[in-house]
Image: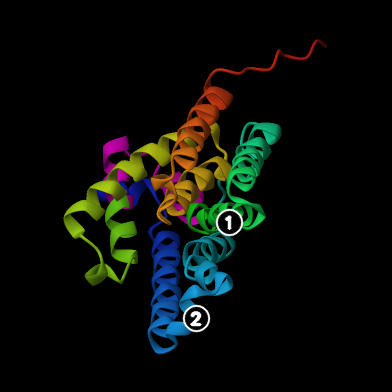
Amino acid sequence: MKHIIKNNHIGAIATFYIIALVLRLMTLLIGNNYPELRENYVFQLSTGLGPIVGALIAMAVFKRKTEYTLVGKSVWKSVATIAIPCVVFGIIGGPETGIICLLAFVYGLLEEYGWRGFLQYELRKLPVWQYVLIITVMWFLWHLDLDQRNLLIFFPILLFASWGIGKVASDTHSLLFCAAFHGIVNFSKRGLLADTSFLIAFIGVIIFWIVLWYFIHMPAKKR
């Protein structure tokens, strides 16, 4: 615990998390009181506002910075990471499906700006297993509607996501790439993967991302 306090700004982390929790709770309460809003895309996006708002406020108040940015180490790769899947799914399922894919990525960014862009960067000096576990627990509790989830499955999924998306963040510094991984999981929950075409496209998109970021290297510019 002393090691965590010494190397990280506890005040900034606490501010981030309190704001994230409060906004999450507010949207859940509104959703429970007005069930018709749950199908509204704008309201669905608002449920992910807590992490990004908490991160921006904590960073502003405590003057914290992060090297994890929207485009990270490559602008064109980050743009392609978002654009190509939306086009592919839009071709398969129609324009509305492409828009839903984009909205899933937008939602992913709202969360990932907080969990990876701020929190992981704050905890980056800890051993990987420590910051992965800390983020997993905080992320798990942030989902206040836990009574509606299978906890035995949900926690391991978040643990794996904290490690996997966390590695994407540390390797590429691209929050759009993190958002894409987060978003495509939410996108797949709509039952689309039961369709063979979507399943093949889903696998193809994941392979495309890995090849794009880890195997394609632009030659250095000559001076």
**What residue is rendered at 53% in x and 61% in y?**
52
Main SS, magenta region, reads: helix
* Disc 1 from disc 2: Cα separation: 18 Å
Q: Which residue is mark 1?
A: 106
Relative image position of residue 207 (x, y in whole percent): 49, 27
Give the SS element for disc 2. Answer: helix
**Which residue, as the protein is rendered here, is positioned at the far right?**
223
Residue toward you, 14 or 163:
163
Query: Coloured how?
Result: rainbow
In the rendered image of this protein, does residue 212 appear above or below residue 192?
A: above
Magenta segment boundaries in residue numbering: 114-135
Question: Where does label 2 land, which residue?
Answer: 37
How far across and down, in percent of the image, does residue 86 sit? Answer: 62, 45
* Circle 2 Cα neighbour tier, 10 Å, few/some/many (<14 / 14–19 / ≥20): some
- The verdict on residue 157 being magenta is no
As helix, strand or loop, the secondary structure at mark 1 comes to helix
- Label of residue 216 in the image: none
The x, y position of residue 35, in whole percent, is 42, 83
Residue at the left extreme? 152
Residue at 22% x, 71% y: name it. 147
**Disc 1 residue type (three-letter):** Val
Residue at the image position 42 percent from the left and 55 percent from the top: 9
Between label 1 and label 2, give the one nearer the viewer.
2
